[in-house]
Image (cartoon, rainbow, N blue to C red):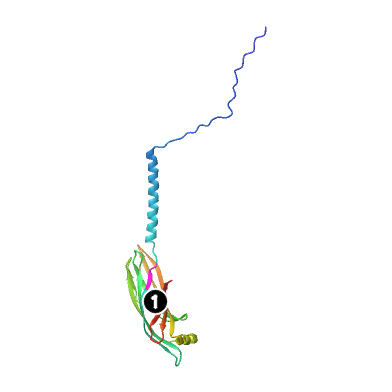
Amino acid sequence: MASPKPSEPPYYPLPSNQHHQNYVVYLPSSSRRRQSRRRILCTAAIVLLAAAVYFLWPSDPDLDIARLRLDHLRIHTVPTFAVDATLRLTVKIINVDVYSIDYSSLVVSIGYRGKNLGFVTSDRGHVRGMASSYVDATLELEGVEVLSDVIMLVEDLARGSVPFDTITEVRGRLGVFFFDIPLKARVSCEVRVNARNQTIIRQNCYNK
């Protein structure tokens, strides 16, 4: 008589869709507060650093023509066209930085129709940080020929006013800690003068 076959263990297929388990880790509230505090401190440090760089970064001074007066103007036609003029002006040097300025020269020049007629140079000076200083300059012209612009000069005299250009430039150094940084500032003015009574009709100044 044949022995019966051993029974095989029952087979159960795995389900086709298994549910994945998700694990969520909760950090303590004190750790979250520390991270938030670090972010706030880092942001505040960056803002303070940017503000310090903005306010402490050196810049050129500002120039302003505080006063401009024409004391004398005479135009010669014989033996040649020439100009005599005396121009007095007061320049205000404005230092917007916290560092002091030592300027080596202040040059004032006057021109007519793009031609330079003459210039004057003042002495050196010092401007404290976040302060301003006034510098007086007198420019005298005597017998300066304007042969290349005779026709324009005759037309200006016929209209009763003569336009002049003035350029004021300051050069110096800015003392930043142990360094000297060169600086330069310039202001230009367009001046129209009454040829009859030698007064300034209009002036327009702008920084370059």
| Boundaries of the magenta span | 60-64
Q: Amino acid at mark 1?
A: Val
Up-down relation of residue 180 to residue 47 (above or below): below
* Residue 82 rendering spot, x and y as whole percentages: 44, 88
Q: Main secondary structure of the magenta part?
A: strand
**Quarter of the rendering occupied by the C terminus:** bottom left
Query: Residue most toward the top?
Result: 1
What residue lies at 39% left-to-right and 58% top-to-bottom? 53
Badge 1: few (under 14), some or many (20 or more) residues near its Cα, within 10 Å?
A: some
Place residue 78 in its image quadrant: bottom left
Given residues 41 and 180, the one toward you in this image is 41
Query: Residue most toward the bottom?
Result: 79
* Residue 183 rendering spot, x and y as whole percentages: 40, 68
* Residue 173 rendering spot, x and y as whole percentages: 37, 68
Place residue 29 in its image quadrant: top left
Place residue 9 in its image quadrant: top right
* Residue 44 rendering spot, x and y as whole percentages: 38, 51
The verdict on residue 63 being magenta is yes
Tell me, yes or no, if residue 184 can be seen here.
yes
Up-down relation of residue 174 to residue 144 (above or below): above
Q: Would you say 161 lies left or right of 3 here?
A: left
The verdict on residue 74 being magenta is no
Tell me, yes or no, if residue 142 can be seen here.
no
Query: Residue most toward the right?
Result: 1
